[in-house]
Image (cartoon, rainbow, N blue to C red):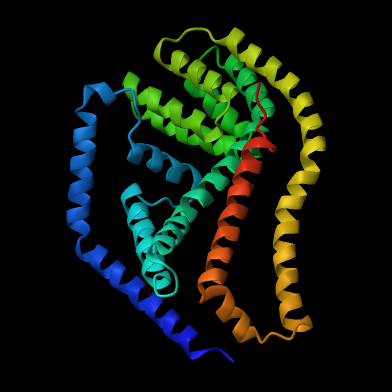
Amino acid sequence: MIDRSMILASVSAIIYLLLVIGVLVLLRKQIEAAVGIFRSRYRLRPERAAREPVFTSLDRLLKTTMKKPISATAFCVVTIALFFTVFIASAKTIAPAAAFVTGAAFAGLPCLFLRVRLERQRRAGSFEGEKLVSAFLTAYLVSCGNIYETIERTICVCPHLKITAKLLSDLLMRLRGTGDPDRVRAATDAFAYGIGTSWSSMLAYAVRVGALKGTDMTPAIEDILAQLREARALAEERRRINGESVRMAAYLTPGLYAGSVFVAIFVMGLPPGRFLYNQFFTAQGFALFTAGLFLFLLNRVLLEMLTNRKLDF
């Protein structure tokens, strides 16, 4: 049977969440104005011109990883609401310092999730590189160096490339909408960011030079294709070696936790309500669950970045 304190804590968490959301909604205009002032001041500082603003980087991350992206401001508001909700709810059972760390950990989970999704998308897109560059080179030769027609032909013959074809479509729309060198550079940088490899940066550079100057980039594209073919052979060997560690992190850790729950309830005879109370509404259980969840997701991110490397050279 669920303990009465569990119900009260859950209701309190919901009330605090609604309270924080209400305050943020009421102060929405003030928050947007403050963000606008911050962005303006950041742009006006010449010594920081070479550094990318945080909101610009977050906007790019959201547009790349989400089908229907939200603004960076809205994402920050949701993250702040999540932090205060978890902080206020957990402060009833654990020390304020531990509650602050717990709230910060939960607030960091959305960014961690987006980072995992970005790395997965980049990895999938990187393995489409050989087919993409091969089709791009063929289209470039057929189009006599017309970069716009090249991209359009490549998109038509590569509908099966889900990641890179979408990035190319976005790139083509942005290139046709402007002739300004800075905007062309921003469009090609967004394409390279979506894949995050050396070959995507080189291809983006070839597109930018072809669009702005009309220089023949055939040798550069041929060099990218040759290096991608060499990288594919190395990637296949690396995948065979690292497959076991990936499966252990993905399935063994959640399986062990599920097994511990099964043993506690069905072998040791602990009532389910008591187990939930000990896990989520006591200081030790909640801290252990939070630390385990955060470390599990962090481990997944590190595995995506280290073992499941992108196809690159």
* Residue in the image at 59% along x and 11% along y: 220
Q: Please state the horizontal and vertical placement of residue 185, each as a whole percent of the image.
A: 39, 22
Quadrant of res 253: bottom right
* Residue in the image at 52% along x and 75% along y: 282
In-image side of 260 versus 168 (left or right): right
In-image side of 137 versus 213 (left or right): right
* Residue in the image at 58% along x and 17% along y: 140
Give the camera-side residue of 122 and 239. Answer: 239
Give the camera-side residue of 11 and 25. Answer: 11
Give the camera-side residue of 1 and 32. Answer: 1
In the displayed structure, would residue 296 be above or below residue 290? above
Res 287 visible: yes
In-image side of 57 versus 240 (left or right): left
Q: Please state the horizontal and vertical placement of residue 63, each as a whole percent of the image.
A: 44, 44
Q: Please state the horizontal and vertical placement of residue 291, each as a whole percent of the image.
A: 56, 59
Res 179 visible: no
